[in-house]
Amino acid sequence: MDAVDRKILAELQQDGRLTVTELAERVGLSVSPCHRRLRALEQAGAIDSYRAHLNAAALGLTFEALVFVTMHGADRATVDAFERAVEAVPHIQQAQRLFGDPDYLLRVVTRDLPAFQAIYDDQLATLPGVQRLRSTLVMKTVVENRPLHL
């Protein structure tokens, strides 16, 4: 990956809806070489996907909680069962396995506290292998979806 590829990636992080013509103009290439580089970046996995970033608050999803999960054990079967179950809960926007205690961090977004409580009681508390859940509410998001520093 060279400086031009990093420039292409930086531009796409700012605006994923750029046409190849607009992208080529911004990075100082003609359309064909820009298109070839773009396809190569996609095939190499540097570009994972294209999607719209939605405004949760504008859609009525104004409640966010971070849930810390401590597991009973760390054997492969327990971890696999937990991670598959987490993937099936649509309100979990992000799930990360951590070193140390706790074992996982889940970012949960819902419309309000009663909706979160229902998800917590009916889905999170019943996840396989869970020993303990601890939650904290997000007061304010300061940085989110920041472009990767290339």
Image (cartoon, rainbow, N blue to C red):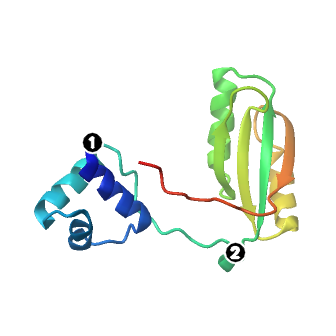
- Observer-side mark, 2 or 1, equals 1
Specify the quadrant of the image occupied by residue 61. bottom right
Residue in the foreground of this view, choosing between 108 and 36:
36
Residue positioned 38% across, 66% down in the render = 16
- Residue 79 x, y percent position in the rendering: 67, 29
Residue positioned 36% across, 63% down in the render = 11
**Amino acid tagged 2:** Ala
Residue in the foreground of this view, choosing between 45 and 85:
45
- Residue 17 x, y percent position in the rendering: 36, 71
Is residue 48 positioned above or below 32 on the image? Answer: above
Q: Marks 2 and 1: CB-CB under 8 Å?
A: no
Which residue is denoted by mark 2 in the rendering?
57
Label 2 sits on a secondary structure element that is helix
The dot on residue 29 is none
Residue in the foreground of this view, choosing between 112 and 119:
112
**Amino acid tagged 1:** Met
Label 1 neighbour load within 10 Å: few <14, some 14-19, many 20+: few
Which residue is denoted by mark 1 in the rendering?
1
- Residue 35 x, y percent position in the rendering: 18, 60
In the image: residue 146, left or right of residue 25: right
- Residue 9 x, y percent position in the rendering: 35, 55
Label 1 sits on a secondary structure element that is loop
In the image: residue 21, left or right of residue 7: left
Residue positioned 32% across, 71% down in the render = 18
Specify the quadrant of the image occupied by residue 119. bottom right
**What is the distance, in whole Å, between disc 2 and disc 1 at their CAs?**
37 Å
Specify the quadrant of the image occupied by residue 78. top right
In the image: residue 40, left or right of residue 55: left
